[in-house]
Amino acid sequence: MGSSSGGSNISSSSLSAQTYSLGATISGLNSSGLVLMVRRQRIGTHLLPTVNALNSSGPMVNTTAVSVGLKATTQRLAGSLPSDTRYAVTVQRQPTGETCTVAGGTGMIQAANVTNVVVTCSDDSYSVSGTISGFTSGGMLLVNGSDTLAVRSGASSFTMPTAVAYASAYGVTVQSQPTGFTCSVRNGTGVMGTATVTNVAVTCSVNTYTVGGSISGLSASGLVLLDNAGDASTLGANATQFTMHTGVAFGSPYAITVQAPPTGLVCSVSNGTGTMGAGNVTGISIACVPNFTPLHSFIGGSRDGANPYHSLIQGSDGDFYGTTLKGGTSNVGAVFAITPSGTETVLYSFAGSYSPYSGLIQGSDANFYGTTAVGGGSGRGTVFKLTPSGSETVLYSFPAASSDPYTGLIEGSDGNFYGTTGAGGTGDDGTVFQLTPTGIRTVLHVFPKVTGSDGQTPYAGLIQGSDGNLYGTTYFGGSSAFGTVFQTTPSGTEIVLYSFTGGSDGEHPYAGLIQGSDGNFYGTTYQGGTSGLGTVFKITPSGTESVLYSFAGGSSDGANPQAGVIQGSDGNLYGATYLGGASGLGTVFRLTPSGTETVLHSFIGSDGANPGANLIQGRDGNLYGSTSAGGTSGYGTFFKVTLQ
């Protein structure tokens, strides 16, 4: 073979004998497990249009799996490949937590090493989510790094907005607590694996806040406050602030009330109810003031009454009306009117020997009716009518044989008046009578003189029971001569329901009865009981008697009640004792239906002394009453007791 000068010739066979390599550059590979699949096929100069064509007919396709190392940046895929070799590089298996893609992965070797295969890897990302419990409010903000999520009120689950890359740390925390709640996170931190995180748990609990405020006028001990009828807190004298013992959960109601007022005080609550917000309640105000208010002191003489002896009534005009035993123009008693604020007017002054021991009633005709114990045609008492303007008419004068009405009248359901006399009758020991509005009297029952089964000397008036019968008491008589409780039909059939024995059951009931809301009758005895100083008793319509309370006297309790009891709108019994208390001048008391007594006021003389009349509950809910002595002139007072 010859050769040309100045150069040499390379034959085509020597070119075809040269081989070339197939390699790739790799970026972002941060984990192990990447396997690339390399397929190649020698096809000469006949190029196939696609990678899939490597599976078509022709010379055998060679397949090689190439494992790529952790964090590799280059990878030799094949070597000693002749020209005209078709190749295809794909991902057979993804690395852990990453996704890799191949660019420039197909082609044919053409007399040069292949270096343009590029494998690009990126981390996989997974969401972070979980559950929420106990959350009913708004305002919670969850964070994971810079990723934030405002959670809607009442949500039970969450998913953070931004997914977290594989192998990256995550940490879910509560950046802003919801209103009124405290929330904590469990399973909130970790390193992202190869699956969605779903076990983050946000647990919320409702916050509790204190309830309290200020107190004014608390000059005595014994104030007990309640919240929602529980959580009793007792405060000492002169306290100016209070905080209830038990906190209240956010969103729950609170209601501060006075369970027990301090001795001699009544306390009112302002701003005491509400729904707990997201902060301590400090704006409740408790204001305590004296529960007793003297409204008028009788001064006697010709221009005022003196010594109010019997119970008051509240007229249809809202004013109170009563009688005095003395005073007035002839100093034998008067009828007065007095406003709830204490402005008094003498409505009528009795003349001659008239003297009203009794109180008044206002009849269905709007006139006032009452009795005098003396005076009249026989000097043994009268029934009178008084118009609201003060015009008096004697409706009936008692004869000597039936005399001395020590108490007032009632108007029966039949429109007639009923009452008692403390003397008169065949034995001169009292009667029960009926009087028509025109002044016609009928004696319904005469109490006998001889001690026996019947009563004697009724000092008290009557009530009409729910059964239509009349009920009352006698001071003497009965099986032991210590007084009775009796029933009389409107036609005059009398039976003794109970005879007092003079022991622990009481003796000598001075006052009349009331019928309670339970249908039983309640009253007082002037003496008897465990200390001999009087009782409050209950008696059933069938005559079973029980003592609710025995007065102990002394400085801490009342003694010897001349007045009866009334039942207040709160269901408790209220009354007055003639003696006992801090100064021995009588008390005003409260008695629960179960027999727990509280002294509401002890008279000291200047504010009144010796209350012998029943109390009355005014339309404003307060108690009103009178004392027969004491006050600025010693002639008695008109007073108010404010109830809690």
Image (cartoon, rainbow, N blue to C red):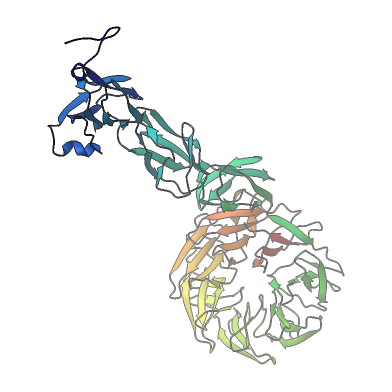
Q: Nearer the viewer, residue 294 or 23?
A: 23
- Identify which residue, 80 or 371, lies in the foreground: 80
Q: Nearer the viewer, residue 597 or 398?
A: 597
Q: In this view, does 97 lie above or below 482?
A: above
Asked if 491 appears above or below 229 in the picture, the reply is: below
Residue found farthest to the top = 6
Q: Position of residue 421 (x, y in %)?
A: 63, 79
Q: Is residue 130 left or right of residue 64?
A: right
Residue 191 higher or lower than 557, as above or below? above
Which of the image's four quarters has the C terminus?
A: bottom right
Please tell me in which quadrant of the rendered image residue 406 appears. bottom right
Q: In which quarter of the image is residue 310?
A: bottom right
520, 4: nearer the viewer: 4
Specify whether 530 is left or right of 348.
left
Please indicate, yes or no, whether residue 165 appears anywhere in the rendered image.
yes
Residue 483 in picture, x, y percent from top left: 53, 70
Query: Percent x, y for residue 364?
Result: 67, 85
Horizontal and vertical percent position of residue 317: 74, 76
Name which residue lies at 31% across and 19% down. Answer: 74
Left/right of residue 628 with respect to residue 282 in the rendered view? right
Regarding residue 453, the answer to whether it shows in the image is no
Q: How many marks?
A: 0
Locate residue 95 relative to residue 380 in the image: left or right: left
Quarter the N terminus occupies = top left
Residue 564 higher or lower than 440, as above or below: above
